[in-house]
Image (cartoon, rainbow, N blue to C red):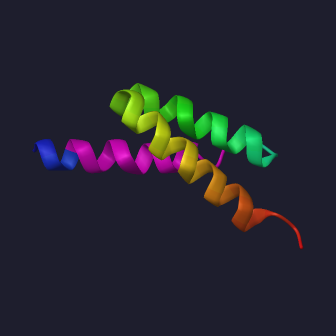
Amino acid sequence: MKTAITAAAVLGTLALAACGTTIEQKAASGAVAGAVVGGPVGAAVGGAAGTVVGQAQKPR
């Protein structure tokens, strides 16, 4: 049961990492979502995920 809750929290964090229009907004929303789920470590992971999503969606 604990694994399912952890997996849901991680997926929720990654989903929220995509919120925003700029890379900075995506990183910030990911960091906030990560902090809620996993404290400081979660904030770092969420911020990194938001940055990756922002870079991937950036027009070339």
Residue depicted at 40% across the width and 37% down the height: 42
Toward the viewer: 9 or 42? 42
Compared with 10, 32 (above or below) is above
- In screen coordinates, is 15 left or right of 2? right
Compared with 10, 60 (above or below) is below
Count up the numbered dots.
0
Residue 53, how many percent across, how many down? 64, 58
Q: Quadrant of the N terminus?
A: top left
Q: Where does the magenta region start and end?
A: 5-19
Residue 38, how many percent across, how many down? 34, 32
- In screen coordinates, is 38 left or right of 52? left
Farthest bottom residue in view? 60
Magenta span includes 45 = no
Magenta-highlighted stretch: main secondary structure?
Answer: helix
Q: Quadrant of residue 28?
A: top right
Residue 48, how many percent across, how many down? 55, 49
Q: Quadrant of the C terminus?
A: bottom right
Toward the viewer: 4 or 52? 52
Q: Quadrant of residue 2?
A: top left
Residue depicted at 19% across the width and 49% down the height: 4
Farthest left residue in view? 1
Magenta span includes 18 = yes
Residue depicted at 65% across the width and 52% down the height: 51
Residue depicted at 40% across the width and 51% down the height: 11
